Image (cartoon, rainbow, N blue to C red):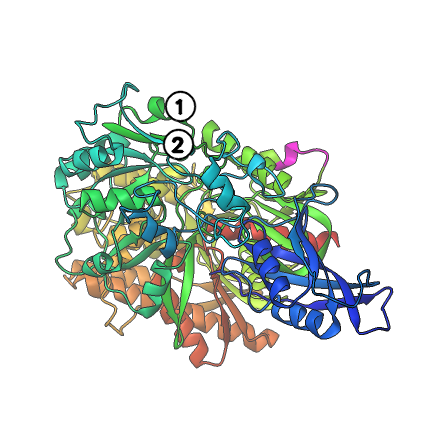
Amino acid sequence: MTPERTSTVQPAVRNADASDRRRVRVFVRGMVQGVGFRPYVYRLGRACGLSGVVRNDGRGVTIEAEGPSSAVAEFLRRLPMDAPALATIERVAVDELCPQRATRDDDATFAILGSDSAGDLSALITPDTATCDACLAELFDPHDRRFRYPFINCTDCGPRFTIVRGVPYDRPLTTMAGFTMCERCRAEYEDPADRRFHAQPNACPACGPAVRLLDASGSLVSLDGTHDPILTAAAAIRAGAIVAVKGLGGYHLACRSDDAEAVARLRARKHREEKPFAVMVRDLAAARSLVELDDAEEALLTDRARPIVLARRRAGARVAPAVAPGHRDLGVMLPYSPLHHLLLRDADATLVMTSGNRSDEPIAFRDADVLERLAAIADLFLVHDRPIETRTDDSVMRVVTLGTARRVLSIRRSRGYVPSPVSVPMHAERAVLACGGNLKNTFCLVRGDRAFVGHHIGDLENLETLQSFTEGIAHVGALFAVTPDVVAHDLHPEYLSTKYALDRRELEPIGVQHHHAHLAACLAEHGERGPAIGVIFDGTGYGTDGTIWGGELLLGDLTTFERAGHLYPVRLPGGEAAIREPWRMACAWLVAVHNGAPPIPSGLRDRIDERQWAAVAHLARTGLASPVTTSAGRLFDAVAALCGVRLRVSYEGQAAIELEMAADGRVEDWYDMPVVRDGDALVLDARPLVRGVEDDVANGRPVAEVAACVHMGVSRAAVDACRAIAERSGVRTVVLSGGVFQNVLLLERTARALMADGFGVLVPERLPPNDGGVSYGQAVVALGRSA
């Protein structure tokens, strides 16, 4: 997921010297601060026999180097090629200067200067990075002075984005500013030959942050003679306790994943009834014991970003059923901080490691309020005194098969990836702020050719999340010197993100239709401008006609689109209630199928009150408090209810997810879902499909087969629609996006069929297909319209 390192050397000759000596000023732009780039330049310059200096500035790194022309040429050749592992070089620009030294280089020196914070501030900040092997070796070496020190780091690893307060990335502008380095740490920090040279979080037990263990009242817990809070916390976890653990971007709630009673208590206290928990395992071998992993999944799991990876659970995996009820998959991650490594080793167990929050709240990250927010959930609190500047949740990824290739699909892009920029396929003459949607919110700030898609905020449904959203915009804008001129927003007038955008009266507002933003985001991520056919399937999106879209066929590019087709429209009986209760959507679809009041299906008679069913059917027939929707997500909800898989949900998308989990992927049968023309638009008529489900369930066909046939039917209809649009338009590129395409069975089958038919298929990879990618799409559309 990390961008490839590229560079373009752009010489701008000013005062070229005619002798065999050469002096250059080199501007390096990209992710080159806090990654050991200056000591790398220092060592390279000395190896090439050059004199010169290197320093950080507000935009990256500036170098001046002088020596024999051949040596300078060798230096410039090697500069982008041998850069440190965490560096991402975007551009190298070279100015020729007049040589100043004599021809002899016996006394050549190269120096590292302090940072220059004047002028334009646009240097990139690296994401937080998992503990490197060298630091891990020291962490568990009893003879090392940092043995079991939970804040060990170097220039190759450790916290970055979550501790930075400003640029240039120097210690005084991080949350480490309050810790004064001891003599030994200072010596490492100032030695260009040391891997901790200018590692801003550098510290040791004598001078750095420290861990404490508290009870729910905030009192220090007796360490029972161990003098080690982590050992004591691990022992408590082994005994069944729930412990709040302060990580890099916020607090986790941890308990043993094989302790059914502890997992049940965690669910009850957190009010998270069924949504799956992630688990953290000690190492790759432990991960293999829980989930099936291929090479691509293992590479993702061990990537320095250390995301949560969704993979197929092994039969007999030692985790409590309540960790991920109703799921064949399990979310697994490896430790990414020294504290995690210590805790996992001391506990000698796989741990549930879920966000430290109450239901619907953002993750807790400030020490001042964590006890108040989590005291009713956690038994103990493993805390430390290094402040977290930016709340950042764990990222979630999975690997899917697109044609013959295994590709990474981002589900939630946050810690480990943010704030790495995403390029845009046009240069922004005006800076843009895009505010995203209401669910799985992210924001996006664009300056020049870089888009900074913010960390995962969550659902904008309360004051705490809105505050996290506004603080994030201000922080990222300040870090990367983005002062927006334009604000892009969703068309839905009641979204808090839309209201925030329209309250920014100093900015030019540009409304972007939700599904067009999905289309544009995927195109732009792949460097494409379009046109393309967009098959955009999700749960909810405000349409240009004021209805609720969600099963859309678009034909468009980065600035404009037309609605080429959509799913057959039905009512959403009771509005939001139909999202929480999928049986209502089953009723609405049966009203459409039977063109009147449908009888309650036999399989639901003992689970739904007949008077309720009749009342909902009345809403669906009359339209009272029941807006029209073309939502593909609600279609899957309806089918899940008809199959008896899920009648009510406790989290977004639960019914559709469990329907996918129930499907037998080996089934090649399908239900008909004809593509018909209604005027200029195509309609995916799902009524025959729903009727087929109704009949087969009544006749006792296994749910696994029914669910598979539904996926095949929807996939075939989408491909048929793309063929029809391509025949009319000549466009042969298809974008598959929207939250429904997190469904791996649907995504892989649809992509495979399209590719077999000769279509080019684009799928979001670096950014999520769900609403986490909408802000980027909004920004791209706004750029095109405001150019």
Q: Position of residue 202 (x, y in %)?
A: 46, 42
Q: Secondary structure at mark 2?
A: loop
Q: Tag 1: residue type?
A: Asp
Whether tag 1 and tag 2 are in contact, CB under 8 A, the answer is yes
Q: Which residue is mark 2?
A: 364
Separation of marks 1 and 2 at Cα, in angstroms: 8 Å
Q: What's drawn in magenta, residue-wise?
A: 501-506
| Quarter of the C terminus within the rendering | bottom right
Q: Is residue 577 magenta?
A: no
- Residue 356 falls in which quadrant of the image? top left
Tell me: residue 540, above or below residue 410: above
Please name whichever residue, 310 or 637, is drawn nearer the observer in this view of the structure: 310
Query: 224 left or right of 514?
Result: left
Disc number for residue 369? 1
Please name whichever residue, 238 or 16, is drawn nearer the observer in this view of the structure: 16
Disc number for residue 30? none
Give the residue drawn at x 39%, y 46%: 394
Q: Is residue 505 magenta?
A: yes
Q: Position of residue 500 (x, y in %)?
A: 59, 34
Query: 71 left or right of 373?
Result: right
